[in-house]
Image (cartoon, rainbow, N blue to C red):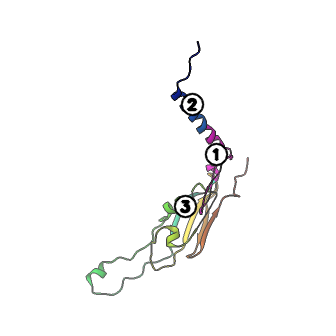
Amino acid sequence: MAESIHPRVLAVIVGLMVAVMLLLAVLFGQLSVWSAGAGEVSHDPMHSIHISSASYGLNCTPSNPPNSTDALSSQTQPVTAQENNALTQVTALCDTRYTCQFNVTAAGVGFDPAPECDKDISVNYRCFSYDVIHNISAHAGETLQIDCSANTPAQP
């Protein structure tokens, strides 16, 4: 006499089969995901944007603090931008996408390292894991655009 499969076991098997089918569809390009505003999400993580560094506002030099005998103002230190200070923000905006764009403003980048200064941004990225590092820069008020959609590695 044949034994029947328990309903819970059958549900687990069906769930695993669906998960495997979705994974295969993503890997072979049959399923693509779109994220509005930032660019198309890559279904091939080996051939997408990978941010390696991002610095915002390094062109802004600290100004001298105002001359004052006020104890509070004499303790104030000028704000300076740090190297690679925008890595987290630009990675969140661009990594694993084919294309990415954002405005070079405090709102577009997500923070303001040097108020009252027109800041530039410089980003280093790759389009696939063994690609050379590309550098792109943009000035305050411009739109920074990274496009890896046509950048595929040469086949051996």
SS label for mark 2: helix
Residue for badge 1: 26
Residue for badge 2: 13
Residue 85's place in the image compared with 2, above or below, is: below
Magenta stretch: residue 34 in it?
yes
CA–CA distance between discs 3 and 2? 36 Å
CA–CA distance between discs 3 and 1? 21 Å
Q: Nearer the viewer, mark 3 or mark 2?
A: 2
Q: Residues within 10 Å of mark 2 (few under 14, many from 20)?
A: few
Q: Residues within 10 Å of mark 1 (few under 14, many from 20)?
A: some
SS label for mark 3: helix
Q: Nearer the viewer, mark 2 or mark 1?
A: 2
The quadrant holding residue 115 is bottom left
CA–CA distance between discs 2 and 1? 20 Å
Residue 93 is tagged as: 3
In the image, the segment drawn in magenta is: 20-47
Residue under the point 62% across and 42% down: 22
Magenta stretch: residue 155 in it?
no
Q: Closer to the camera, 33 or 124? A: 33
